[in-house]
Amino acid sequence: QRMAEDAISMGASTAQKGFDERQASEEELKKALDEVEAADKKISAAAAAKNATDEKAARAAHKAAMDRSQQAQARCLQVSDAATAQRMADEAATLWEADAHKAAEGDAVLQKQEEAARTASAEVDALGNKVLAAVSAKNGPAEQSAREAYQPAMERLRAAQAKAKKASDEAADQRLAEEVSAIQAAAAQKAADDVAARKKVEDAAAKKAAAEAAVKKAAEEA
Protein backbone atom coordinates (compact mmCIF):
# COMPACT_ATOMS: atom_id res chain seq x y z
CA GLN A 1 0.00 0.00 0.00
CA ARG A 2 2.91 2.34 0.75
CA MET A 3 4.24 1.65 -2.75
CA ALA A 4 0.86 2.56 -4.22
CA GLU A 5 0.77 5.77 -2.16
CA ASP A 6 4.30 6.65 -3.31
CA ALA A 7 3.26 6.07 -6.93
CA ILE A 8 0.29 8.42 -6.47
CA SER A 9 2.51 11.08 -4.86
CA MET A 10 5.06 10.89 -7.69
CA GLY A 11 2.28 10.92 -10.27
CA ALA A 12 0.73 14.03 -8.71
CA SER A 13 4.07 15.85 -8.96
CA THR A 14 4.49 14.81 -12.60
CA ALA A 15 0.87 15.75 -13.33
CA GLN A 16 1.40 19.26 -11.93
CA LYS A 17 4.51 19.64 -14.07
CA GLY A 18 2.50 18.44 -17.09
CA PHE A 19 -0.26 20.96 -16.31
CA ASP A 20 2.30 23.79 -16.16
CA GLU A 21 3.87 22.65 -19.45
CA ARG A 22 0.45 22.49 -21.09
CA GLN A 23 -0.34 26.05 -20.03
CA ALA A 24 3.03 27.26 -21.35
CA SER A 25 2.58 25.44 -24.67
CA GLU A 26 -0.94 26.83 -25.10
CA GLU A 27 0.32 30.35 -24.42
CA GLU A 28 3.16 29.79 -26.90
CA LEU A 29 0.66 28.64 -29.53
CA LYS A 30 -1.63 31.62 -28.90
CA LYS A 31 1.32 34.00 -29.28
CA ALA A 32 2.38 32.33 -32.54
CA LEU A 33 -1.17 32.51 -33.96
CA ASP A 34 -1.37 36.18 -32.99
CA GLU A 35 1.88 36.76 -34.91
CA VAL A 36 0.43 34.98 -37.94
CA GLU A 37 -2.67 37.18 -37.78
CA ALA A 38 -0.55 40.35 -37.42
CA ALA A 39 1.59 39.31 -40.41
CA ASP A 40 -1.58 38.70 -42.46
CA LYS A 41 -2.74 42.24 -41.74
CA LYS A 42 0.67 43.65 -42.71
CA ILE A 43 0.58 41.76 -46.01
CA SER A 44 -2.90 43.12 -46.76
CA ALA A 45 -1.87 46.66 -45.84
CA ALA A 46 1.33 46.50 -47.93
CA ALA A 47 -0.56 45.03 -50.90
CA ALA A 48 -3.21 47.74 -50.63
CA ALA A 49 -0.48 50.40 -50.55
CA LYS A 50 1.31 48.66 -53.43
CA ASN A 51 4.49 48.64 -51.33
CA ALA A 52 6.40 45.64 -52.68
CA THR A 53 9.24 45.95 -50.15
CA ASP A 54 6.93 45.95 -47.14
CA GLU A 55 4.84 43.19 -48.65
CA LYS A 56 7.91 40.99 -49.16
CA ALA A 57 9.04 41.60 -45.57
CA ALA A 58 5.53 40.89 -44.28
CA ARG A 59 5.34 37.64 -46.25
CA ALA A 60 8.69 36.55 -44.82
CA ALA A 61 7.46 37.40 -41.33
CA HIS A 62 4.23 35.51 -42.07
CA LYS A 63 6.15 32.39 -43.13
CA ALA A 64 8.31 32.54 -39.99
CA ALA A 65 5.20 33.00 -37.83
CA MET A 66 3.50 30.06 -39.56
CA ASP A 67 6.54 27.87 -38.89
CA ARG A 68 6.47 28.88 -35.22
CA SER A 69 2.74 28.19 -34.97
CA GLN A 70 3.21 24.72 -36.48
CA GLN A 71 6.01 24.00 -34.01
CA ALA A 72 3.82 25.29 -31.17
CA GLN A 73 0.93 23.09 -32.30
CA ALA A 74 3.24 20.06 -32.39
CA ARG A 75 4.46 20.88 -28.89
CA CYS A 76 0.88 21.24 -27.64
CA LEU A 77 0.13 17.75 -28.96
CA GLN A 78 3.29 16.34 -27.34
CA VAL A 79 2.45 17.92 -23.99
CA SER A 80 -1.19 16.80 -24.25
CA ASP A 81 -0.16 13.21 -25.03
CA ALA A 82 2.26 13.18 -22.10
CA ALA A 83 -0.34 14.68 -19.74
CA THR A 84 -2.98 12.17 -20.86
CA ALA A 85 -0.60 9.24 -20.39
CA GLN A 86 0.38 10.47 -16.93
CA ARG A 87 -3.28 10.98 -15.95
CA MET A 88 -4.01 7.38 -16.94
CA ALA A 89 -1.01 6.25 -14.87
CA ASP A 90 -2.30 8.28 -11.90
CA GLU A 91 -5.74 6.69 -12.20
CA ALA A 92 -4.17 3.22 -12.33
CA ALA A 93 -2.09 4.02 -9.23
CA THR A 94 -5.23 5.19 -7.40
CA LEU A 95 -6.99 1.90 -8.24
CA TRP A 96 -3.90 0.04 -7.07
CA GLU A 97 -3.98 1.90 -3.74
CA ALA A 98 -7.69 1.06 -3.30
CA ASP A 99 -7.07 -2.62 -4.04
CA ALA A 100 -4.05 -2.65 -1.71
CA HIS A 101 -6.23 -1.20 1.05
CA LYS A 102 -8.89 -3.86 0.44
CA ALA A 103 -6.23 -6.59 0.50
CA ALA A 104 -4.91 -5.28 3.82
CA GLU A 105 -8.45 -5.27 5.24
CA GLY A 106 -9.00 -8.79 3.91
CA ASP A 107 -5.81 -10.01 5.59
CA ALA A 108 -6.95 -8.45 8.88
CA VAL A 109 -10.37 -10.17 8.64
CA LEU A 110 -8.68 -13.47 7.78
CA GLN A 111 -6.36 -13.18 10.77
CA LYS A 112 -9.33 -12.52 13.06
CA GLN A 113 -11.33 -15.47 11.68
CA GLU A 114 -8.35 -17.82 11.89
CA GLU A 115 -7.85 -16.82 15.54
CA ALA A 116 -11.53 -17.50 16.23
CA ALA A 117 -11.20 -20.92 14.58
CA ARG A 118 -8.12 -21.73 16.68
CA THR A 119 -10.00 -20.71 19.85
CA ALA A 120 -12.98 -22.90 18.90
CA SER A 121 -10.65 -25.80 18.10
CA ALA A 122 -8.93 -25.46 21.47
CA GLU A 123 -12.35 -25.48 23.18
CA VAL A 124 -13.33 -28.68 21.37
CA ASP A 125 -10.02 -30.31 22.29
CA ALA A 126 -10.47 -29.34 25.92
CA LEU A 127 -14.03 -30.75 26.01
CA GLY A 128 -12.87 -33.92 24.28
CA ASN A 129 -10.23 -34.37 26.98
CA LYS A 130 -12.90 -33.83 29.64
CA VAL A 131 -15.04 -36.56 28.08
CA LEU A 132 -12.09 -38.97 28.05
CA ALA A 133 -11.15 -38.09 31.62
CA ALA A 134 -14.73 -38.60 32.83
CA VAL A 135 -14.97 -41.96 31.02
CA SER A 136 -11.66 -43.00 32.58
CA ALA A 137 -12.86 -41.96 36.02
CA LYS A 138 -16.24 -43.61 35.38
CA ASN A 139 -17.87 -40.31 36.31
CA GLY A 140 -21.21 -40.46 34.57
CA PRO A 141 -22.52 -36.99 35.41
CA ALA A 142 -19.22 -35.33 34.41
CA GLU A 143 -19.16 -37.34 31.17
CA GLN A 144 -22.74 -36.36 30.33
CA SER A 145 -22.03 -32.67 31.05
CA ALA A 146 -18.88 -32.73 28.88
CA ARG A 147 -20.69 -34.50 26.02
CA GLU A 148 -23.54 -31.97 26.16
CA ALA A 149 -21.05 -29.12 25.90
CA TYR A 150 -19.01 -30.90 23.21
CA GLN A 151 -21.70 -30.88 20.49
CA PRO A 152 -22.37 -27.10 20.45
CA ALA A 153 -18.62 -26.51 20.67
CA MET A 154 -18.21 -28.64 17.53
CA GLU A 155 -20.90 -26.59 15.80
CA ARG A 156 -19.11 -23.39 16.77
CA LEU A 157 -15.86 -24.83 15.44
CA ARG A 158 -17.44 -25.77 12.10
CA ALA A 159 -18.98 -22.29 11.82
CA ALA A 160 -15.64 -20.64 12.67
CA GLN A 161 -13.82 -22.83 10.15
CA ALA A 162 -16.39 -21.93 7.46
CA LYS A 163 -15.91 -18.23 8.20
CA ALA A 164 -12.13 -18.64 8.11
CA LYS A 165 -12.37 -20.46 4.77
CA LYS A 166 -14.59 -17.72 3.35
CA ALA A 167 -12.21 -15.03 4.65
CA SER A 168 -9.25 -16.92 3.15
CA ASP A 169 -10.92 -17.13 -0.26
CA GLU A 170 -11.87 -13.44 -0.19
CA ALA A 171 -8.39 -12.42 0.96
CA ALA A 172 -6.83 -14.47 -1.86
CA ASP A 173 -9.14 -12.77 -4.40
CA GLN A 174 -8.27 -9.35 -2.99
CA ARG A 175 -4.54 -10.08 -3.07
CA LEU A 176 -4.87 -11.23 -6.69
CA ALA A 177 -6.78 -8.04 -7.54
CA GLU A 178 -4.03 -6.00 -5.89
CA GLU A 179 -1.33 -7.84 -7.87
CA VAL A 180 -3.23 -7.23 -11.12
CA SER A 181 -3.67 -3.54 -10.21
CA ALA A 182 0.03 -3.25 -9.39
CA ILE A 183 0.95 -4.73 -12.79
CA GLN A 184 -1.50 -2.42 -14.58
CA ALA A 185 -0.23 0.61 -12.66
CA ALA A 186 3.38 -0.27 -13.51
CA ALA A 187 2.47 -0.72 -17.19
CA ALA A 188 0.57 2.59 -17.27
CA GLN A 189 3.46 4.42 -15.61
CA LYS A 190 5.95 2.86 -18.06
CA ALA A 191 3.75 4.02 -20.95
CA ALA A 192 3.68 7.52 -19.46
CA ASP A 193 7.46 7.46 -18.98
CA ASP A 194 7.92 6.33 -22.59
CA VAL A 195 5.75 9.21 -23.85
CA ALA A 196 7.66 11.65 -21.63
CA ALA A 197 10.98 10.29 -22.93
CA ARG A 198 9.85 10.70 -26.55
CA LYS A 199 8.73 14.24 -25.78
CA LYS A 200 12.14 14.99 -24.27
CA VAL A 201 13.88 13.71 -27.42
CA GLU A 202 11.53 15.72 -29.64
CA ASP A 203 12.06 18.82 -27.48
CA ALA A 204 15.82 18.44 -27.82
CA ALA A 205 15.51 18.03 -31.61
CA ALA A 206 13.29 21.11 -31.81
CA LYS A 207 15.76 23.17 -29.77
CA LYS A 208 18.62 21.99 -31.99
CA ALA A 209 16.67 22.89 -35.15
CA ALA A 210 15.83 26.32 -33.69
CA ALA A 211 19.47 26.95 -32.81
CA GLU A 212 20.61 25.92 -36.30
CA ALA A 213 17.97 28.18 -37.85
CA ALA A 214 19.13 31.07 -35.67
CA VAL A 215 22.77 30.52 -36.70
CA LYS A 216 21.75 30.35 -40.36
CA LYS A 217 19.70 33.53 -40.05
CA ALA A 218 22.57 35.34 -38.33
CA ALA A 219 24.96 34.21 -41.08
CA GLU A 220 22.58 35.45 -43.78
CA GLU A 221 22.15 38.80 -42.05
CA ALA A 222 25.93 39.11 -41.66
Image: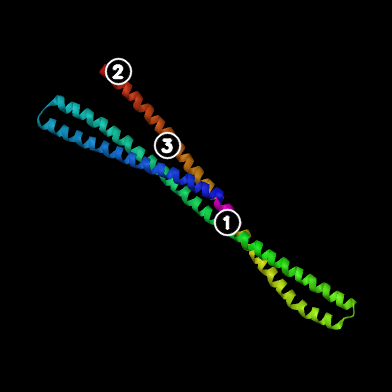
Circle 1 is placed at which residue position? 177
Of 121 and 26, which appears nearest the observer? 121
Q: Is residue 48 left or right of residue 26?
A: left
Name the spot of residue 130 as percent of width and height, x first. 83, 74
Distance between the alpha carbons at the discs numbered 2 and 1: 63 Å
Q: Nearer the viewer, mark 2 or mark 1?
A: 1
Q: Residue at x 26, y 37 (%)?
A: 31
Distance between the alpha carbons at the discs numbered 2 and 3: 30 Å
Of 55 and 7, which appears nearest the observer? 7
Q: Is residue 81 left or right of residue 36?
A: right
Q: Is residue 131 left or right of residue 192?
A: right
Distance between the alpha carbons at the discs numbered 1 and 3: 33 Å
Q: Residue at x 25, y 38 (%)?
A: 33
Q: Are marks 2 and 3 in contact (CB under 8 Å)?
A: no
**Magenta residues, as a range?**
175-182
Predominant secondary structure, magenta span: helix
Q: Residue at x 56, y 49 (%)?
A: 2
- Whichever of callouts 2 and 1 sits on the residue coming sooner in the sequence is 1
Circle 2 is placed at which residue position? 219
Q: Is residue 199 above or below residue 138?
A: above
Q: Residue at x 18, y 26 (%)?
A: 56
Of 149 and 27, which appears nearest the observer? 149
Circle 3 is placed at which residue position? 199
Q: Which label sits on residue 188? A: none
Q: Is residue 163 left or right of residue 138?
A: left
The local crowd at label 1, few if under 14, some if 14 to 19, many if 20 or more residues have their Cα within 10 Å, is some
Amino acid carrying label 1: it is Ala
- Whichever of callouts 1 and 3 sits on the residue coming sooner in the sequence is 1
Name the spot of residue 3 as percent of width and height, x first. 55, 48
